[in-house]
Image (cartoon, rainbow, N blue to C red):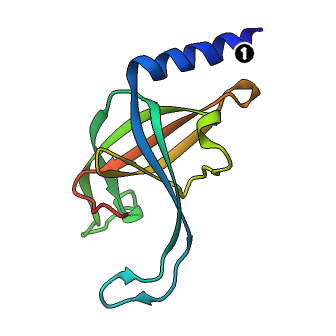
Amino acid sequence: MKYRFVKQVIKSLKRQYGQSLTLKNITQVGTIDWTKGTSSNRLTESKYISKVVILPTREQTKFNYDLSFVAANKNFVYGGFYDQSQRDIIIDKDDLGTFEVNNSTMAIFNSNTYQIKEIREYEEQNALYIIIIRVKGQTNES
């Protein structure tokens, strides 16, 4: 009974705020050109979903550093700042069909490629709550 209510709420959100999204899995990579950094003969499996609930973007500047940053008496440290945007999406499991979503799946929204950071499954496997991230300035893979 209560799961039917969750299903109705997700369908209502899809009708009111739904946007299109493409999910893509790289199933096999052929040859890799190490000098150019490109790969050929990529076999991909993709799934276009016409209505996905996409929540607003959270943008923040992050800082990563090498372990030597915390070590004592180090003169040079590797690290840097970067801008990261994060979005939350809700996908109805009925829209996926047999497509399998995992942490290596790419999400393409508004011609920007996002990486999946976290996947949560709702009760009774009605929907997926997915957190996707994109670093500002990264190239779009398709």
Residue 121 image position (x, y, % from top left): 66, 33
Going 49% across and 41% down the picture, which residue do you hit? 49
- Is 72 or 140 nearer to us in this picture? 140
In which quadrant is the N terminus drawn?
Answer: top right
Residue 47 horizontal/vertical position (percent) = 52, 51
Q: Viewer-proximal residue, 72 or 134?
A: 134
Classify residue 114 as left or right of residue 103: left
The percent position of residue 5, horizontal first and vertical second, equals: 66, 10
* Horizontal arrangement in the rendering, residue 7 relative to residue 13 (left or right): right
Q: Secondary structure at mark 1?
A: helix
Which of the 4 quarters of the picture holds residue 78?
bottom left
Q: Nearer the viewer, residue 55 or 86?
A: 55
Q: Residue at x 51, y 15 (%)?
A: 12
Q: Residues within 10 Å of mark 1 (few under 14, many from 20)?
A: few
Q: Amino acid at mark 1?
A: Tyr
Q: Which residue is mark 1?
A: 3
Does 87 sit above or below residue 38? above
Identify which residue, 142 or 60, lies in the foreground.
142
Point out the image quarter for the C terminus.
bottom left
Residue found 72% across the figure and 31% down from its top:
125
How many numbered discs?
A: 1
What residue is at 71 percent from the left and 13 percent from the top? 4
Image position, residue 57 (x, y; %): 31, 32
Q: Is residue 82 above or below residue 123?
A: below
In the displayed structure, would residue 13 be above or below residue 41?
above
